[in-house]
Structures are given as structure tokens and as C-alpha cells.
Amino acid sequence: MLLVLGFLLVLLQLNFNSKKLNATSVKIIAEIANIMMPVVRVLGK
């Protein structure tokens, strides 16, 4: 669970560092987040 969140944070960090926050990477991160949030909620309970 924490690994997934950390992975998302690393992706965001890389995007900010490269200053190439293009629509594709944002969309991919959003998709991953949308998929993982229910899983995180279930695991958190």
C-alpha cells in the first residue's frame, strides 16, 4: 500500500523535476491513482 503511494509520489517528483508535466503523464498518474485508491481504502480497513 505504502509502496504504491510512494511510487506515485516518485512519478510526480520526476515529472516536476523534469518540468515536463505533460498531459500524458498526468493522465497516466490519474488513471493509476483512480485504480489504486479503492484498493488502498480496502487494505486500510
Image (tube, rainbow, N blue to C red):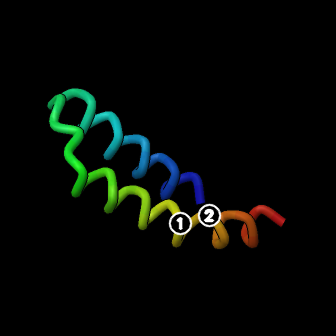
User: Residue 24: image x %, image y %?
Assistant: 22, 57
Q: Amino acid at mark 2?
A: Met
Residue 8 vs residue 43: left or right? left
**Cα distance in 3D space between marks 1 and 2:** 6 Å
For disc 2, the marked residue is 37
Point 32% across, 34% down: residue: 13
Q: Secondary structure at mark 1?
A: helix
Contact check, label 1 and label 2, Cβ < 8 Å: yes
User: Residue 29: image x %, image y %?
Assistant: 37, 56
How many other residues sit within 10 Å of disc 1, few (<14), some (14-19) or many (≥20)? few
User: Residue 36: image x %, image y %?
Assistant: 55, 67
For disc 1, the marked residue is 34
Q: Within the image, what quadrant is residue 19 found in?
A: top left
Point 73% across, 69% down: residue: 43
Between 17 and 28, the residue placed more toward the observer is 28
Q: Quadrant of the N terminus?
A: bottom right
